[in-house]
Structure formats: structure tokens, C-alpha cells
Amino acid sequence: MPTGRLYGIGLGPGDPELVTIKAARLIGAAEVIAYHSARHGRSIARQVAAPYLRDDQIEEALVYPVTTEKTDHPGGYQGAIDEFYQKSAMRLAAHLDAGRDVALLCEGDPFFYGSYLHMHKRLADRYPTEIVPGVTSVSAAAAQVGQPLAERDEVFTVLPGTLPPAELARRLAETDTAAVMKLGRSFESVRSAFAEAGKLDEAWYVERATTSRQRVAPLSTVDAADVPYFSVALLPSSRRSDRPGCGVTVVGLGPAGRPWLTPEAATAIAEADDLVGYRTYLKRLPDSPRQRKHPSPNRVEAERAALALRLAQEGRRVAVVSSGDPGVFAMATAVLEVACQPEYVDVPVTVLPGVTAAQAVASRIGAPLGHDYCVISLSDRLKPWSAIERRLAAAAEADLVIAIYNPASHTRRHQLVDARDLLLKHRDPDTPVVIGRDAGGPAESVRAVRLEDLDPSEVDMRTLLIVGSSQTRMAERDGRQIVFTPRRYPE
Ligand code: SAH
């Protein structure tokens, strides 16, 4: 006579509606229903399966002799448990030998830390066996917390809470998301491992997920004394991914025009919900009915940065625009400075590079930046004039080529006069100076003069200067003025 079949039936986390159709069918069909239970006799598994049971089925309750209490078994706790599993296997084997199918019920998934595994090890090599997978408590808990377990290339780690705390902390620190099983008595060490890994604030506690006695709470708020075995700690995919791409991207528009906007920057702008920036720069971008523009006047960088970070906290994708490169006298630092305040620590900030004015101007006239050079802003709005003088003198002394940003404005007029006089103390009057205005724009003009002939009244806010070194050469090619700094420097 053929033997019966052993079914390891996953019942899911507790809600009878989360029992699979296949599990329900096999539970209804089996002649023997087996389940583990504690000594009080109530079996969670049987309760979940109850809607699918028939009255005439044989029930085999496999009652644990011990759980956490002391035992007088000569082999201690392990001895008592081993004997129990051996006897249970013999009881089920008797049914299988007699040709009866046995459905062994198991919470969650049988192959995922399932109590079923003890019987599987003792019977599966002797009887035809089939596993019916179930919804795990981890999936259920994530669904109840309402945050994804893992997305994109995130690494998800499953950990038993019974690991040594240092091991737990190490693994929690390394992973992106995690579930910690078997809390119960290990709860306190699990919680301290989360704290040590710096992830306690993001972690959730879920007890008896999807049952009528379910409890969901931030892990940090749970009283260790109330924690049952049927609970998990979750480190879900965090706010980072509440909405893909939300956060602040600081984008460099290049010095002028579409050709000098990188494809990466163009994509970031196209994907943004909100565009934040100095109004002159925002005007360079087309209006889209899908996007909000938040123009601001010049010189309010910190307020602009805070606005961008607040918008991102509301789940919006924000692009903060700068001209040129955002890291060169522009918004990248302003945003990062404000982003370091505690209230904005959760906001992702990305900086995308752009072509800076110095590169743009240099390219139009040759290669004046072809050797060592430095970059100095002549604006004394955010630093004292004495620091600017000191740096100009040091750069001139070091024979660096000097790219000068913000050389003058309507109100800042004396600075360039003073700077030229200071440079003339160190540099030959014949030193080439490139005057680049509106490079790439409609009013572009880029030409070179002798340092002595530099006329500050020709220079405005839209101008960048490149002061040559002792080696920088001016020449004519094809009727066109060129300036370059040789790569070789004399001994
Ligand atoms: N983040 C910008 C610089 C901002 S400071 C960048 O990387 O280019 C502003 C100064 O940049 C201006 O005063 C001027 O000196 C220079 N500048 C910006 N765009 C320019 C252009 N198209 N032509 C010449 N100079 C420019």
C-alpha cells in the first residue's frame, strides 16, 4: 500500500484571508491535521486554519513539553525537546505508513524559520513531501508599517534576534534594510544593537501582524517586558525612498546657453517639481506647467537654500540652479551649509557639476589656464578686502595664473582698481589679461589686453578676468588673438 503524503503547509502571518488557496484546499483535503502547540494547548496555527478544517479530520496536537521553564529531563532542555520531536515524528509516521495524508500546519512560511522543519528533517527522506509556501511575518509586518522592505539595489538582511548583540549591530550597520526575528527574550539586546548601529530611530516593532491582537510601534518606544515571541523588528526602506528622487539637486547651468548645459544637469532640471534660484538664472529655463519656479533676488542664498530643503522635506524633487558650476562661488555650499542644520539631516542633497565661467572664457581665447592657476572672487561681500589683497599678492608672488570672478559691480568699483595696482607690483606691465564678458551669451566679447592697459570701467558683473603668469603668451593666429600658458615652466 502506498504511504500518505506529508504536507508542510504555510499559513501566513495570522489573517485567515492570507492563507493561500492551495493551503486552504490541502487543509480541507488531508485526513490528518497536525500542529505544534504550547502546553496551554492553544495553537495559533490551528486557529488560522480553522475556517478550512472539516469536522471528521484526525487532529494531532504536538504539544511542546517545555518552552522556557525548567525541566527534569536528564538531557536538560535540549534532551526534552529532542525526545519530543522524535516522538512527534513517530506519531506522524504512523499515519503516513497507513496511507493517510498529513497536513502539518505552520505559521508564516514553513521553510522560513518554521517549526515544521523539525518534522521535515525526520520524515522527508522517507515519505513523499510537499511544501506549500506562505506569506511570512516579515512581509506582513512591512505591509502593516506601510514602508517597503527593499527597493532598487537595496540589500535586505534577515537576522535572528538571538545573535550576539555585537554581531547584530555590525550587520545592521552594514545593511540597507533588515528584519530581526525571534524577539521575545532577546528584545533588549536587539534594541541596543539597533542603537549601536545608529538605526534605532528608523526601526519599527510589529507584534502579531495581521491578527486582531496586532501592535505596531516605533521600536524605541516598546516596553521590553511586553514583547512576545511573535514579533519582529523592522528596518524598512527609509524616507530616502518615500518618493524616488525626492531631495535637493544643486545644478550648474553652465555660463550660458543650452550647449554648455550638461545632459545630466538637463535631466535633473526636467525631472524636478520645483526650481529654486536667483531670478536671472531661472529666467534662462523654459516655463513648464508641471513645474513651480521659486525665483529670489540676489544675495539671499541661505533663505533660498532653506526653501529648497523644506520643499524636499515635503517630498518634492527640487533643483537649485546656479550659473556655471554650482561649487564655484555659488549655491552648492550655501545649500550644504544649511543642510547641515539638524532639521534637514534627512534631506538628500546632490551636486551636479557645470562648466564654470573660467573654463568657458579660457576656451574662447585659447588656453590661458593650461598651467597652474587659481580662482579668486573679488567680491568683499562675504570676506574682508584685506583677505582678498593678501591672496592676490600671494598668488601673484607664486606666479599663478589668476581667474578673477566677480571683478566689479555697479556699487563695487574701487576693488578692481586696487587689485590691478597690487598685481602690477608683482607682474610685468605686459602681462596678458583676458577680459571675458558674457561668454556663450548674446553679448559675448572675449579679448586680451596688457595688465597696465586694463581699464576697470570696462568691467562689470558679467565679466571674468584671467590674469596671466610670467609665462602666459599673447599671439595672433589667422587674424585672431590667442592667449595660452605653456605647460613647461622654466627652471
Ligand atoms: N558659479 C559660477 C560663478 C558665479 S560668480 C561659475 O561657475 O561660473 C559670478 C561671476 O562669474 C560673474 O561675476 C563673472 O565673473 C563670472 N561669470 C559667470 N558667467 C559668465 C559668463 N558667461 N561670462 C563671463 N563671466 C561669467
Image (spheres, helix red, strand yellow):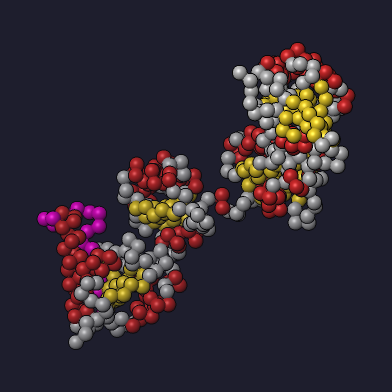
Q: Position of residue 360 (x, y in %)?
A: 74, 37
Give the residue at x 38% y 43%.
170
Which stretch did the figure color magenta?
58-75
Q: What's the magenta bit mostly, secondary-structure-wise?
A: loop
Where is 200 relative to 28, above or below?
above
Question: Residue lying farthest front?
Answer: 478
| Of residues 414 and 34, the one drawn nearer to the viewer in this rendering | 414
Image quarter of residue 129? bottom left
Residue 286, given in percent of the width and then of the height, sits at: 80, 51
* Quadrant of res 301: top right
Report the side of 213 relative to 106 (left or right): right
Residue 26 rendering spot, x and y as whole percentages:
35, 79
Q: Is residue 23 above or below residue 255?
A: below
At x 86%, y 22%, the residue is 455
Q: Quadrant of the C terminus?
A: top right
Residue 118 colored magenta? no
Between 462 and 95, the one lying in front of the other is 462
User: Is residue 67 magenta-colored?
Assistant: yes
Q: Quadrant of the N terminus?
A: bottom left
Residue 227, percent from left and from top: 37, 52
In the image, what residue occupies the spot 77% across and 27% down? Answer: 474
Q: Residue at x 42, y 67 (%)?
A: 135
Residue found at the very far top of the displayed protein = 425
Q: Residue furthest right?
A: 457
**In the rendered image, which quarter is residue 99 located in?**
bottom left
The reply to whether residue 427 is in sight is yes
